[in-house]
Image (cartoon, rainbow, N blue to C red):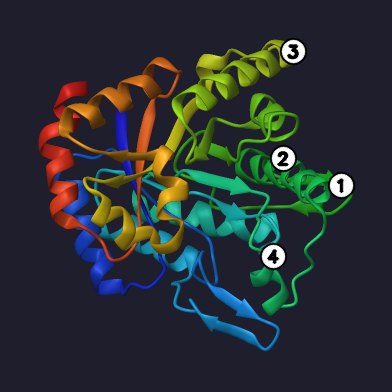
Amino acid sequence: MKFGVHTGLQNTTTQELDALWQRIEAHGFDWISIWDHFYAADATFTPEGITSGSVSLEALTTHTAVALRTSRVRCGSLVYCVGYRHPAVLANAIATMDHLSGGRVTLGLGAGWHQAEYAAYNIPFPPAPVRLRQVSEAIRCIRALFTEDVANFEGEFFQLRDARCDPKPVQARLPIWLGGGGEHVTLRLTARYADGWNVPFVTPDVYAHKVRVLHEHCARAGRDPAEIECTVNLALAWKDEDLEAQFGGIAQAVRPNVLIGSTQEVVDRIGEYRDAGCVQVNLALRAPFDPDGLDRFAADVMPAFR
């Protein structure tokens, strides 16, 4: 079992994040990731505009900072929204980032969901089936740019014409993950094109079901499911007060999907995800960060799986 930390970019500062990243790497975690939002995930909107939650650092910039400020962990994204950037623009940024990190970058892609962000920036927000078709095209465009000297692609949404992405990433196959739990499309696309899969805030039984569905898609695609890293994002809260501090009014709604309780209870819960097919648990942290809680997890929980 590997462990990572998904560092939310809302309501924090670059100084706080840098200190957190250094702590995470020093503790021996395997992974640090960022999210892709223009506003906080819990931003409040009214017909007159946003009333709270506008503080959120930009994703590509902070992803680059993780790459530069660490030396060992994998530097991931969970996940870049396909509607916010042309895949060729994202591919070039990620390839350069891979050089800056010495070959430690993982690219996560997703269909996006925060409709208010789209609306605020006047970015088209098509229905979910359309956004998922965009993801399908984006992952193929990016893979072609990463691996082919000259890439050509003719899609419904994206086109490449004698396109180049030079220099190529340091990694011969830079991992591309897909994020989301949709069983009909997202998991099918994962089986066909992705190197990893991530879903946030689901219970172990739900996770096990989705892993089975993914394996069924792999069988139909002629793909070995062992080639796909199955991961999960979970919140950590040692006590109810910690949960309230992180999630406020939705704390009790997310509680079934949170690592909470005693050390043994957290260890046992992670074991359930491992038995369900998960190979990496990411602690989804958001400000106000709890460094003492992170220290406790590293000291008391991680050794049980190593």
Residue 220's disc number = 3
The picture places residue 28, in percent across and down from the top left corner, at 18, 39
- The mark closer to the camera, 4 or 1, is 4
Gap between marks 4 and 1 measured at Cα: 24 Å
Amino acid tagged 3: Arg
Q: Which mark is residue 115?
A: 4
Q: Nearer the viewer, mark 3 or mark 4?
A: 4
Q: Earlier in the sequence, mark 2 or mark 1?
A: 2
Name the residue nearer the viewer: 256 or 127.
Answer: 256
User: Alpha-carbon distance for marks 3 and 1?
Assistant: 24 Å
Task: Name which residue type carries label 2.
Answer: Arg
- Give the label, 4 or 2, closer to the camera: 4
Residue 304 appearing in the image:
yes
First in residue order: circle 4 vs circle 2 = 4
Kind of residue indicated by mark 1: Gly
Instruction: Report the residue at 58% width, 41% height from top.
Output: 179
The residue depicted at 44 percent of the width and 68 percent of the height is 61
The residue to which callout 1 is attached is 155
- Label 1: how many residues lie within 10 Å, few (<14), some (14-19) or many (20+)? some
Rendered residue at 65%/40% (across/down): 143
Distance between the Cα atoms at labels 3 and 4? Answer: 33 Å
The amino acid sitting under disc 4 is Gln
**Figure quadrant of the C terminus:** top left
| Residue 55 higher or lower than 245, as above or below | below
**How far across and how far down the image is residue 211, in percent?**
56, 21
Give the residue furthest to the bottom. 48
**CA–CA distance in space, label 3 to label 2:** 19 Å
Kindly identify which numbered label has been placed on residue 140: 2
**Numbered disc in front, either 3 or 2:** 3
